Amino acid sequence: MRHTLLLLVVSLFVISCGDTKKKTTTETQTSTTESPIIGRSNYAVVWNWTTTDVKLVTENAQKISEELTALWKEDIVENVYYNSDSKVDKLAHFPNISFFIKAEDTKDAESILNNLTVVKKGIAKFSLHPVGIKWLGRNIEAIKERGMTKSYVVVWNTITKHDQSNAKELIKENVKAQSDAILDLWEEGVVENIYMDIEGTIELNLVSDFVCFVNVNSEKEAEELLGKLPFVTKNIASYKIFPVGTFWLGDSKEN
């Protein structure tokens, strides 16, 4: 169990998601449920630096670390990734850290995050993006067998505007094939930490549907894998890929 959240802030660009309305019948042996506390929702927390003062960050790094670690231990924060080689929103040697927060609603999440030193001292600002329920966590044995790789977040958006006339029919016809394909990748340790916004998919809101993480050695390799999925080959969904570095902390109850 790793008890020091490296430092701070994230650039997890989770803005839209997209995929499956309902997942297939296979019960898996890892974290497949959403928050154990009834009524909580999952949000991706997107951070951006608001300072260029390296000294300010350094002086507050320990306090920031302690506060984030406490949230993780309290099962408020989960699935933390750190990126020491970020090409976007980089500040000196500090890693960008991405994670999810569990809260009753947006107001509750904002209240929790606004109490953090990183916000109060004007070091970084955040935005929240709902990601629905967690379908699958990590297949740890399969991931270990694959060995060390990089991690990328894949943000899906089902259906483009010109498809809307037959969108629901297309999703219904292909959702099982898409789910099965994703599950196969999960069983191989290629895909992990999958969140679904079922309501967003059904309503075709073009905002939030599906987020997952892919463990591969390069973005090109991720593109090759994702390009074979039914929702891509059938032009039902589009996606964007963003590097998040390396997995660090998962669910505090499982560590």
Image (cartoon, helix red, strand yellow):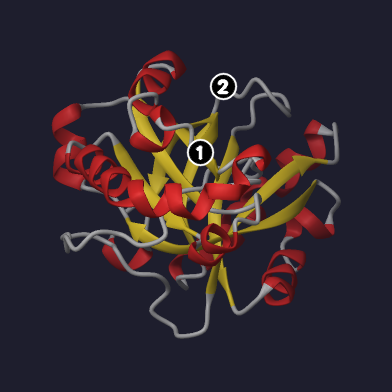
Residue drawn at (52%, 84%) of the image = 39
Q: Quadrant of the C terminus?
A: bottom left
Q: Is residue 35 left or right of residue 109?
A: left
Q: Is residue 182 left or right of residue 79?
A: left
Residue 132, percent from left and from top: 51, 64
Quarter holding residue 68: bottom right
What number is the disc on residue 85? 2
| Mark 1 secondary-structure assignment | strand
Q: Is residue 240 left or right of residue 214?
A: right
Residue 4, percent from left and from top: 47, 50
Q: CA distance from mark 2 to mark 1?
A: 29 Å
Residue drawn at (67%, 47%) of the image = 46
Q: Give neighbour class at mark 1: few <14, some 14-19, many 20+ (Cα, 10 Å).
A: many
Q: Is residue 202 left or right of residue 46?
A: left
User: In the displayed structure, would residue 143 be above or below residue 103?
Assistant: above
Residue 3 shows in the view: no
| Mark 2 secondary-structure assignment | loop
